Amino acid sequence: MPNSSSISEFLLLTLGDMRQLQLLHFWLLLGIYLAALLGNGLISTAVACDQRLHTPMYFFLLNLALLDLGCISTTLPKAMANALWDTRSISYAGCAAQLFFFVFFISSEFSLLTVMSYDRYVAICKPLHYGTLMDSRACATMAAAAWGAGLLNSLLHTASTFSLPLCQGNAVNQFFCEIPQILKLSCSGSYLREVVLIIFTLSLVFGCFVFIVVSYVQIFKTVLRMPSEQGRHKAFSTCLPHLAVVSLFLSTGLFAYLMPFSVSSTSMDLMMALLYSVFPPTLNPIIYGMRNREIKHALSRVLQYTLLHHQ
């Protein structure tokens, strides 16, 4: 069997055996990708162009949209190209780069979702202190910490995964280069260091999730004491979808990374990967942005401004 030094490329999972099925998958992925680009692009444009949206909540929303764009652009274009050209190959360097950027964006995103839950907690539970606790310097520091944590996590995992000797061929059983699938190709017993690193990372992720849940419990307690029914409805309609996306993101990610190799199947691995890598970047703009009245107003103002200048 080839070892890692002789592997120059990896073979990704084909999305369907028949040509018609591959093309159907190509069009489906293209539709999802364009929806994610449009949604996240509109949010980024609205927040960047409208001075009224230069507040902490929308600053973090802009960061989330940029991370979502990066995350989905790391995995889907290569999968679409392979489906369209009926090929499976990705170069060794390409695979390493894909894994690095994917872990970077996904780790940074979860860190940012934790920061966003803190922002909502301060806004709803400590409104009088919001201006001092969430000033521009604090917001920039928190966002930088989220991106920095993602970068550090990505460097550690990529270096650890690609330093393993590979004895099980070069066929990655996934539509992108994913850590658990690379580990399956490593020589038996050699991947324990990376498994320890994954468990350490997931324990930190779980800690963040507990922080998010505790923040939302405090938020819900405060909201339930509100005299205005409209205020309660607005807070719940904002917070519950956030919690749902975070839960989906975390549960499917944990499942993909902690499931023993012996019980994993190709179809289950594929479904879990789609649920934690493709759906959140596509759904986040709808849940966090497009239901937001201020974002809609900002986009209509940007559109009117653009049309006036083109006339």
Image: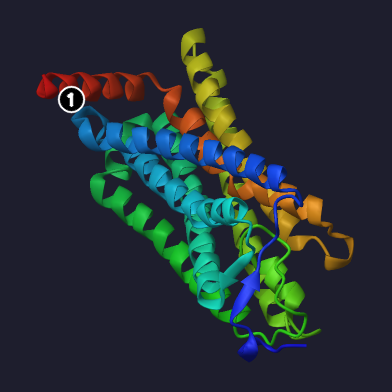
Q: Residue furthest right?
A: 262
- Tell me which residue sits at (70%, 51%) in the image: 15
**Percent position of residue 56, x then y:** 32, 39
Residue type, label 1: Thr
**Percent position of residue 71, x then y:** 49, 52
Relative to residue 177, is residue 141 drawn left or right?
A: left
- Residue 199 seen: no
**Percent position of residue 140, x then y:** 29, 52
**Percent position of residue 4, x then y:** 65, 87
Q: Which residue is mark 1?
A: 306
Relative to residue 191, is residue 128 drawn left or right?
A: left
- Residue 136 seen: yes
Q: Nearer the viewer, residue 287 or 188?
A: 188
- Tell me which residue sits at (20%, 18%) in the image: 304
Helix, strand or loop at mark 1: helix
Give the vertical position of 79 relative to 197 (above or below): above
In which image quadrant can residue 45 be found? Answer: top left
- Tell me which residue sits at (71%, 55%) in the image: 254
Disc 1 packing (10 Å; few <14; some 14–19; many ≥20): few
Q: Nearer the viewer, residue 17 or 76?
A: 17
| Quadrant location of the C terminus in the rendered image | top left
Q: Nearer the viewer, residue 54 or 285?
A: 285
Relative to residue 58, is residue 257 drawn left or right?
A: right
